[in-house]
Image: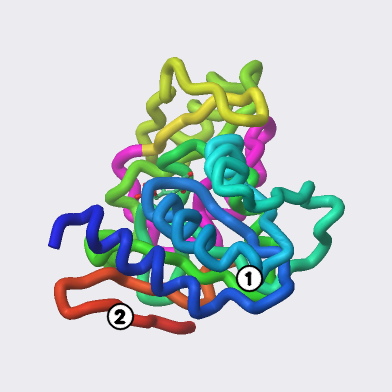
């Protein structure tokens, strides 16, 4: 199977977690796009969605799925999103699509976070994928220096502006042995909006697409 077929497999499998008459939290990325397309088939059974990006909002609306403001939706039962890496404790690196801040907000609203990913995303130790950090533009250099001091090599994702009007630094060369402590440390840097490390709020379920089918990991 191609990587995209594995993504489709888990995107469709996540439908099993959707409860009738609820608002569904929807992440961002190519794997989630398969989930959105699958969700469209049962759109009459749900109230609508809360979206984590302008891109996902556009895709949801194109399918005729109502999109609610996060403030109006309140707590939601389910959030479905992809990841760039997951360890076996379902702590994640996210933000490859620059949507990390809104993703973290929708994840925080959700009772259950179901992560969908092809099997290549499972790692023993987080950090091979460069860790995205969303920063306020005027703090870019300051945050970069502090990230260097924390042992990483930050690279400005030039030309990318997030949905919130901010910038992204991708931190290379990390081996994140203590994700909880590292997330806290990066969050302390003035000018950091969000770090794409989801350790304090990991996924609850990871659906991994493999040649043998969907593998389900739970915490
Ligand atoms: C976007 C994300 C995505 O979930 C992550 O980049 C995975 O993307 P894809 O499903 O395209 O592999 O965090 O900010």
For the image, the number of numbered tags is 2
Where, quadrant-wise, is the N terminus in this rendering? bottom left
Examine the rendered structure and indicate whether residue 190 appears above or below residue 184. Answer: above
The residue carrying mark 1 is 78
Relative placement, left or right, of 46 versus 42 is: right
> How many residues crowd around disc 2 within 10 Å: few (fewer than 14), some, or many (20 or more)?
some
Q: For the point 31% across and 67% down, which residue is it?
A: 9
C-alpha span from label 2 to label 1: 19 Å
SS at badge 1: strand
> How many residues crowd around disc 1 within 10 Å: few (fewer than 14), some, or many (20 or more)?
many
Tell me the magenta residue range. 172-200
Is the Cβ of the residue at disc 2 closer than 8 Å to that at disc 1? Answer: no
Q: For the point 38% across and 47% down, which residue is it?
A: 30
The answer to which quarter of the image holds residue 131 is top left
Instruction: Using the image, tell me which numbered label, if any, was put on residue 215.
Output: 2
SS at badge 2: strand
Instruction: Using the image, tell me which numbered label, if any, was put on residue 90.
Output: none
Q: Position of residue 117 (x, y in %)?
A: 35, 62
Relative placement, left or right, of 111 versus 174 is: right
Residue most toward the right?
72
Q: Which is nearer the eye, 176 or 150?
A: 176
Q: For the point 41% across and 41% down, which residue is it?
A: 96
First-in-chain label (2 vs 1) = 1
Examine the rendered structure and indicate whether residue 25 appears above or below residue 134. Answer: below
Q: Position of residue 95 (x, y in %)?
A: 47, 44
In reply to whether residue 65 is colored magenta, the answer given is: no
Examine the rendered structure and indicate whether residue 13 appears above or below residue 38. Answer: below
Q: Position of residue 135 (x, y in %)?
A: 60, 30
């Amino acid at each position: 199977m191609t990587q995209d077929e594995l993504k489709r497999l888990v995107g469709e499998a996540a439908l099993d977690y959707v409860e009738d008459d609820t608002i569904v939290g929807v992440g961002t990325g190519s794997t989630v796009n398969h989930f959105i397309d699958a969700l469209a088939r049962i759109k009459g059974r749900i109230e609508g969605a809360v979206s984590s990006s302008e891109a996902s909002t556009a895709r949801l609306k194109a399918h005729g799925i109502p999109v609610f403001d996060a403030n109006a939706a309140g707590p939601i039962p389910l959030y479905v999103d992809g990841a760039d890496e997951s360890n076996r404790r379902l702590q994640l690196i996210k933000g490859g699509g620059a949507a990390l801040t809104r993703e973290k907000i929708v994840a925080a609203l959700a009772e259950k976070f179901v992560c969908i990913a092809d099997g290549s995303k499972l790692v023993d130790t987080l950090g091979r994928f460069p860790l995205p950090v969303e920063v306020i533009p005027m703090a870019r250099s300051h945050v970069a220096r502090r990230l260097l001091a924390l042992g990483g090599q930050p690279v400005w994702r030039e030309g990318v502006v997030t949905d919130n009007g901010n910038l992204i630094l991708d931190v290379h060369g990390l081996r994140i042995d203590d994700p909880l402590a590292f997330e806290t440390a990066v969050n302390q840097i003035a000018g950091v909006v969000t770090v794409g490390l989801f350790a304090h709020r990991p996924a609850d379920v990871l659906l991994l697409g493999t040649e043998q089918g969907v593998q389900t990991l739970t915490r």
